[in-house]
């Protein structure tokens, strides 16, 4: 525990109960979000969901704490202090609800009267972290403009600067002696060390979690538990450990039916931008070693029949915001990018396996093909907006509502698959006693549409490129960075609207009610014309948010999949954080794989 960390905790202890007075003073130099109050204002939970399930679906800002541990800590607090300091009544049709605050903890116990007159504790809807956040909101309202530390933003800096300017917020390009509201990191949570307040745009462990092996493992766990729900991820084998299974299974398939000739794509574990990727048709073509070292990676079923536009393969880059892990809040950007291959597509054959411009959609590869088309228009060229592609498909009679709802489902399910382990990472870096920071993160989902329009997940990028310029050969052999209008349109919108959602003074939106008819019919479809229409925000200066909440909005349909997360909560509670028995993500992976194996038996 660092000195700085201890100091902030001591400050917090002192500030308990003093927040109301502080609100009146100039808070410019205060550490935001790190002043929890014992004397929290009463709360009136209204959502029946919130009161009936242990998985919160009520939109209540972000919380870092883990229910198991919180509950335990607060139970002992109640026992030791034994004092309930205030109560609130809330009448509803079902009965008489009572909200109890426990002194010094910020914890609220909510109770409801049964028809028989007994009280039952129905839900502990707010925990100390949510209280801290709310206090942070209150303070921040007085403290405009919001401050952003951009000193570690790296290649997202340009888009970030434009966004901050549009929001009229305050940028600290060299960092700041005192705390900022938001820290924008270019790579990982650890880009700035010793942050104990505010919000960081990266989660601890996200890079590790989304590496190809770990993502495949996490999705595999879900495939074992819910095979139909997780059929959007191609069959994958982890290398080198599953090499034997891979070869055995492929030989068995071929023996059964000699006409089957599948293709596989091999991806190095830490790779990106198509680096080190190759296609094979026979397990013996796998390159297993680099020198004397076994190569880590995955070998994956290759999707042979992708949907083509103008006879070219393309994939979708979708931006997804994890606004909070607990409660889980997911937003999807209505506008994304599509990246096109630069060589006409043919199904894989031994002859064309090495044609990367035909099989791999990576911008970074195709930009070097002589056929790459840089375009000022968003609906032509080798990189286009998602909405322009959906518009084009709709014009051809494709049911794009269905496609879009399938994409939303894929995103929610994928996030649900990685959240359990992320919670273990989170716990290790930001244990419940640490004042902050809290985290959010923009992820880049790479999705392929199959010919039958089914979306397939290729990978999730923890650091999607936020560059808004691209390299161009302006004269023979002379390369320059020039603005890319398509990237700017999409990426500035995503960053700016992420900031708007993370604004500490942002009025928390109510959870949108799911409309009758539900998920498939209810969702807005990102269409070209719609995104061009600039509806204004309250101040009349900003377009409406391009990020749409999908979770908890659709929690009813997906909550049942959050099974492993409950196991993670137990792991954290009993194994992950107890004294010397502090076990981390690797131990959790083993724990989970044993668990699912046991379930299958
Ligand atoms: P990288 O991180 O190196 O970009 P990806 O997993 O995104 O690795 O793969 C690179 C490209 O290969 C994708 O953009 C896509 O065009 C193609 N690709 C990847 N996996 C598959 C697959 N299973 N089937 C068909 N094409 C794939």
Image (cartoon, rainbow, N blue to C red):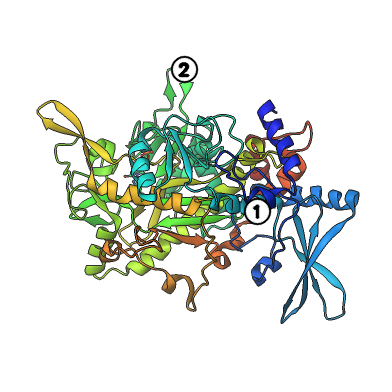
Q: Earlier in the sequence, mark 2 or mark 1?
A: 1
337 horizontally vs 132: left or right:
left
Rendered location of residue 307, percent (x, y): 28, 57
Residue placed under numbered mark 1 in the picture: 130
423 horizontally vs 386: left or right:
right
Q: Quadrant of residue 483?
A: top left
265 horizontally vs 477: left or right:
right
- Quick one: SS at disc 1? helix
Task: Mark 2 vs mark 1: give the one in front.
Answer: 1
Considering only vertical position in the picture, is 272 above or below 26? above
- Residue 106 appears anywhere in the view: yes
600 horizontally vs 244: left or right:
right
Q: Residue at x 30, y 59 (%)?
A: 451
Disc 2 residue lies near ligand 1 with CB under 8 A: no
Which sits in the foreground, 26 or 550?
Answer: 26
Residue placed under numbered mark 2 in the picture: 292
**Residues under numbered marks 2 and 1 in contact, where contact means CB atoms less than 8 Å apart:** no
Rendered location of residue 525, percent (x, y): 35, 66
Q: Residue at x 34, y 36 (%)?
A: 273
Specify the farthest residue to the top: 292
Q: CA distance from mark 2 to mark 1?
A: 51 Å
- Quick one: SS at disc 2? loop
Q: Residue at x 30, y 54 (%)?
A: 305
Crowdedness of circle 2 by 10 Å Cα count: few (<14), some, many (20+)? few
Considering only vertical position in the picture, is 23 above or below 515? above
Rendered location of residue 265, percent (x, y): 37, 40
């Amino acid at each position: 525990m660092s000195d700085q960390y201890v100091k902030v905790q001591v400050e917090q202890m002192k500030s308990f109960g003093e927040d109301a007075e502080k609100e009146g003073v100039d808070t410019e130099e205060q550490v935001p979000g790190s002043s929890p109050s014992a004397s929290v204002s009463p709360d009136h939970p209204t959502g029946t969901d919130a009161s009936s399930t242990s998985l919160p679906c009520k939109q209540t800002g972000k919380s870092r704490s883990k229910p198991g541990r919180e509950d335990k800590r607060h139970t002992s607090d109640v026992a030791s202090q034994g004092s309930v300091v205030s109560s609130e009544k809330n009448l509803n049709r079902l009965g008489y609800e009572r909200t109890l605050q426990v002194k010094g903890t910020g914890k609220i116990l909510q109770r409801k009267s049964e028809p028989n007159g007994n009280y039952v504790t129905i839900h502990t809807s707010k925990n100390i972290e949510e209280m801290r956040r709310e206090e942070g909101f209150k303070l921040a309202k007085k403290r405009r403009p919001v401050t952003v530390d951009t000193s570690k933003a790296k290649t997202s800096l340009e888009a970030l600067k434009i966004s901050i300017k549009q929001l009229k917020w305050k940028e600290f390009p060299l960092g700041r002696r005192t705390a900022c509201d938001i820290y924008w990191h270019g790579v990982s949570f650890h880009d700035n060390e010793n942050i104990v307040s505010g919000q960081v745009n990266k989660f601890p462990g996200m890079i590790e979690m989304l590496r190809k092996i770990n993502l495949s493992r996490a999705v595999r766990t879900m495939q074992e538990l819910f095979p139909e729900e997780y059929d959007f991820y191609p069959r994958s084998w982890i290398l080198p450990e599953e090499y034997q299974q891979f070869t055995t299974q492929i030989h068995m398939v071929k023996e059964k039916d000699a006409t089957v000739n599948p293709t596989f794509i091999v991806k190095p574990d830490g790779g990106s931008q198509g680096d080190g990727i190759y296609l094979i048709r026979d397990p013996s073509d796998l390159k297993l070693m680099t020198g004397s070292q076994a190569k880590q990676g995955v070998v994956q079923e290759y999707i042979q029949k992708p949907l083509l536009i103008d006879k070219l393969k393309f994939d979708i880059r979708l931006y997804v915001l994890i606004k909070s892990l607990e409660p889980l809040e997911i937003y999807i950007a209505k506008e994304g990018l599509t990246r096109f291959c630069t060589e006409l597509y043919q199904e894989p054959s031994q002859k064309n396996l090495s044609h990367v411009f035909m099989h791999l959609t990576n911008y970074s590869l195709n930009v070097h093909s002589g056929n790459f088309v840089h375009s000022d228009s968003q609906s032509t060229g080798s990189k286009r907006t998602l909405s322009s592609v959906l518009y084009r498909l709709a014009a051809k009679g494709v049911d794009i509502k269905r496609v879009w709802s399938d994409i939303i489902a894929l995103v929610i399910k994928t996030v649900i698959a990685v959240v359990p382990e992320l919670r273990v990472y989170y716990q290790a870096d930001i244990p419940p006693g640490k004042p902050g920071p809290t985290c959010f993160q923009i992820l880049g989902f790479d999705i392929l549409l199959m010919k039958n329009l089914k979306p397939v997940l290729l990978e999730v990028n923890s650091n999607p490129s936020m560059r808004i310029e691209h390299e161009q050969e302006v004269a023979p052999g002379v390369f320059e960075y020039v603005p890319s209008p398509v990237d700017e349109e999409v990426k500035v919108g995503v960053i700016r609207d992420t900031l708007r959602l993370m604004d500490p003074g942002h009025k928390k939106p109510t959870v949108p009610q799911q409309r009758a008819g539900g998920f498939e019919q209810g969702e807005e479809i990102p269409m070209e014309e719609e995104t061009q229409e600039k509806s204004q925000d309250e101040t009349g200066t900003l377009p409406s948010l391009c990020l749409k909440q999908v979770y908890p909005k659709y929690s009813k349909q997906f909550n049942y999949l959050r099974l492993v997360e409950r196991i993670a909560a137990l792991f954290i509670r009993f194994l992950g954080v107890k004294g010397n028995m502090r076990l981390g993500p690797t131990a959790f992976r083993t724990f989970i794989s044993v668990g699912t194996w046991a379930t299958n038996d």
